[in-house]
Image: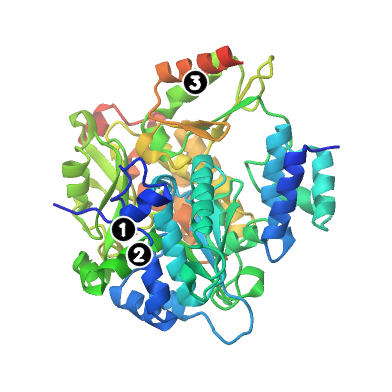
Amino acid sequence: MYELVLLKNIHDPRAADIDRYIELGGYAASRKVIKELTPAEVIETTKQTGLRGRGGAGFPTGMKWSFVPKDTGKPIYLCCNADESEPGTCKDRVIIERDPHQLIEGIIIASYAVDCHQAFIYLRGEFSLGYRMLEKALDEARARSYVGRKIFGSGFDLEIVLHSGAGAYICGEETGLIESLEGKRGHPRQKPPFPAVQGLYGCPTVVNNVETLANLPHIFTRGVEWYKSLGSGPKNTGPKLYCVSGHVNKPAVVERELGIPLPELINDICGGVRNGNKLKGVIPGGSSVPILRPEEIDVRMDFDSLAAKGTLLGSAGIMVIDETACMVRLALRTARFYAEETCGQCTQCREGTWWMEQVLHRIEHGQGKMSDIRMILDMCSNMKGVTICVLSDACAMPVEAMINKYREEFEYHVTEKRCMVGTKSHAHA
Amino acid sequence: MMFSQETESKFKHLASLYPHKRSALIPMLLVAQKEHGYVKPETVEYVAKYLDLSASEVESIMSFYTLLHRNPVGRYHIMICTNLACMLRGSDEIEACVQRKLGVRFGEITADGLFSAIEFECLGSCTTAPAMQINGEFYEDLDVRKVEEIIDGLRKRA
């Protein structure tokens, strides 16, 4: 039986109240960290746990913190990336809305580790309830001096500013987030310099995801050995949130160890494919990652096992797709999203996403040519690894995989000028 | 007076929160929009002046963000998620139902000014799909009957 860590409080309707959160053991970890440990010890402990960022890239959190230079004379900033907008992903929202103090504690610990005295929560503009919950939680924490001047009676000052975005997927990219927080268009920046050296207002900056930060109180309550006992190996440790959506009987945000087998998640925990339908594919890490065919899903949900299968853990937004869905339509919807959300700085992305949508649109509507399929694959290879940020790759990778793995559906749309789903050829594909 | 006392004091607070006051731009525009329903041209001028920016710069930044409206929307603004997870769970029907109920197409406002609706990108409601938001609040696990009840309920309340 898996014991919940990150979601342990979410079914307690009062967990968002600071008194109840403290009754449940809350703020003990952050208090202990600030009163008993040095920042270097916090970084070292976090490194030892093997915690990797939960926003998508999986970069080791302790190492990210250790890149922050201490001697620049400039302030150091921490940004909590709460701009959750990767299609298929709804995990951070659960923490924000139902256990906001857990996140605030994480921010306190991370800020202390990197010597930050002003942290920002960049919250998705659509999360109105989340905004109210965090605003109230921050007020409560301030009233108890857990946030503000000399927190927990120590000499450490920390102000946390709640900042609302206004609807732009690219602001979840860390340098896009920083630009947006500076009051500009959310255009990602060329790297290097990395934010750790030159981030918000040109100062050293750490950007950490909500779920990543929510891990911290538990690490400092239960220790490194406990943390490392969870997961599928030394490079994939700790608890993990998975968002299982689409054609399953019981869609849910599920917490298990990092590296749970994907079939267990789909079949045992989420009730299997709906109506006894046949599985067509699974997108394992949000809309930006390559899809897996049914014969490929016997994989552990961790960074390295999914990479070995040619896809990514990403945000662990798992979308389950059954035989009733048309792969051409899914590819079109995917391309349309990135065409809508491209910031427009790089030609390959601005033009590539738009053209991909146009060409997929004509295939979907029975006006495509066989050469269109080759053309899209060609575009995909020209869109990868050539732009300032990875939005362009995030459009090319999934579309390319959909075409390569379900090519017969695209060709059927071209030759028969209609959808293969529901036809005899589909049943045999 | 262009803004209420409350909005003015929120502006003042927001401009004081950041090491560089320009960071308050988007939050200020959201607050202004809450009062007027959209960002009026005068608001752009006003906020630009407040933050020592040019109006054209504010316009340019605003155009980047989908939640900032440069034109009026309905009193109830419906955003229907049509991205993958919702699409797999039937957002097509939700879209059709909303347009049928309101008798307008996406981007238009009903004659009584009450409703407007648009298609929207992933709202982060994937495990409770299909979903939509009305004035920023979530409505989840939708079906046609539920959508009809929600819209009827809002009509009655108005």
Q: Chain of mark 2?
A: A
Q: Which residue is mark 3?
A: B96
Q: Which residue is mark 2?
A: A28
Disc 1 + disc 2, Cβ < 8 Å: yes
Seen at 43% across and 69% down, the residue is A109
Q: Which residue is mark 1?
A: A25
Identify residue type, mark 2.
Answer: Ala
Q: CA distance from mark 3 to mark 2?
A: 51 Å
Q: Is residue A199 left or right of residue A136?
A: right
Q: Position of residue B15 (x, y in %)?
A: 73, 56
Hey, which residue is sitting farthest bottom in the picture?
A71
Q: Is residue A355 left or right of residue B38?
A: left
Disc 3 + disc 1, Cβ < 8 Å: no
Identify residue type, mark 3.
Answer: Ala
The mark tally for this picture is: 3
Residues packed near mark 1 inside 10 Å, few (<14), some (14 to 19) or many (20 plus): few
Describe the element under mark 3 as helix, strand or loop.
Answer: helix
Identify residue type, mark 1.
Answer: Gly
Above or below: residue A398 compared with residue B36: below
Nearer to us in this view, A313 or A1? A1
Residues packed near mark 2 inside 10 Å, few (<14), some (14 to 19) or many (20 plus): some
Q: Is residue B52 left or right of residue A64?
A: right
Q: Position of residue A406 (x, y in %)?
A: 32, 44
